[in-house]
Amino acid sequence: MGDDFVYEELVSSGNMNLLSDGKLKSAIIDYYANLKVREERLIVYSTGIIRFISDIRPFDSENPNNINQYDQDEAMAAFKTVEFRKMVDSEISYTYKVRDYLIKQEQMSIEIIGLINNELDKNK
């Protein structure tokens, strides 16, 4: 079950029409549409840096600090490559995109909460 289960249930059951405030309904629809687009876009921007590092030496959760000299030398050689530096640059860009997406999603959430509170105040 995804994070949008309640929203999908509202839409598929027709219960979204129970919301009388058009602005609230529109804000909720926009929120979930933007969430889906952002998730898809972040997959596109993913750099693969974790896979790159794991291919050098898979993480050993039993002995995370145990790395032999050969693995150290191999890792250092890989970290000095142009490919790795490009991945780090891409990862930094990716991180800023994630931050920007989260800020936007938070702003949308705050707007929806405000609209919900307004609706609840009207019905007191």
Image (cartoon, rainbow, N blue to C red):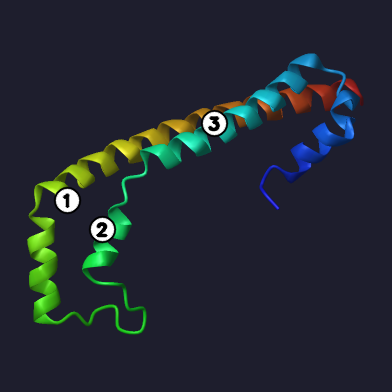
Q: Is the residue marked by circle 3 packed among few (<14), some (14-19), or many (20+) residues within 10 Å?
A: few
* Residue 17 found in image quarter: top right
CB-based contact (under 8 Å), mark 2 and mark 1: yes
Q: Position of residue 111 (x, y in %)?
A: 64, 24
Q: Amino acid at mark 2?
A: Phe
Point out the tag, 2 or 3, that comes first from the N-terminus. 3
* Residue 92 found in image quarter: top left
Which residue was labeled with disc 3? 37
Q: Amino acid at mark 1?
A: Phe
Q: Nearer the viewer, residue 7 or 58?
A: 58
Q: CA distance from mark 2 to mark 3?
A: 26 Å
Q: Position of residue 26 (x, y in %)?
A: 72, 19
Task: Tell whether 73 sits left or right of 65.
Answer: left
CB-based contact (under 8 Å), mark 2 and mark 3: no
- Label 1 SS: helix
Q: Position of residue 73 (x, y in %)?
A: 7, 71
Task: Tell whether 92 sits left or right of 21.
Answer: left
CB-based contact (under 8 Å), mark 1 and mark 3: no
| Residue at position x 79%, y 15% in the image | 22
Task: Tell whether 42 sits left or right of 20.
Answer: left
Which residue was labeled with disc 2? 52
- Label 3 SS: helix
| Residue at position x 71%, y 53% in the image | 1
Q: Which mark is residue 84?
A: 1
